Image (spheres, rainbow, N blue to C red):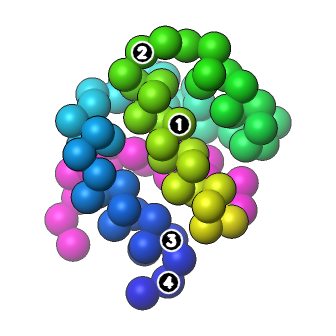
Amino acid sequence: MDIVDEVIEKIRNDPQIRSTRFSNKFLNTVGEICSRYGYGATRLFLLGRDDNESKALLKVLDMIVERNLSVEIGTLIFKKLNAIKFARR
């Protein structure tokens, strides 16, 4: 199993992330911020909001940064998070 698969499995198995409803528009916004400005700016954007969606995305961001994934892969994970949550392996 490669590193990306490990992160995807952690996301799928996390109860907070699985129970959070994510807006596709918000996920695209977070993905665009990540793509353009990197992980630090993404964290700053999410910290400025006080909702369950942002808290769960901060958890996803921590998982991505912890495994030292590239910004391109992180962006893809954010944009495809709803699909990742419900995809069957």
In the rendered view, would you say 35 is above or below 52? below
Q: What secondary structure is found at the residue carrying circle 3?
A: helix
Could you say which is closer to the camera, residue 13 or residue 26?
Answer: 13
Q: CA distance from mark 4 to mark 2?
A: 32 Å
Q: Which residue is mark 4?
A: 2
> Between tags 1 and 4, which lies in front?
1
Q: Identify whether 61 is placed above or below 20.
A: below
Q: Give how far apart the Cα atoms at labels 1 and 4 are.
A: 22 Å
Say which of 59 and 31 sits in front. Answer: 59
Q: Residue furthest bottom?
A: 1
Query: Residue sitting at 34 percent across and 28 percent down?
Result: 22
Q: Majority secondary structure of the magenta segment?
A: helix
* Horizontal and vertical percent position of residue 11: 36, 55
Residue ID for mark 2: 51
Give SS at disc 1: helix
Q: Position of residue 32 (x, y in %)?
A: 66, 34
Residue 76 sits inside the magenta stretch: yes
Dot 2 falls on a residue whose secondary structure is loop
Residue type beneath disc 4: Asp
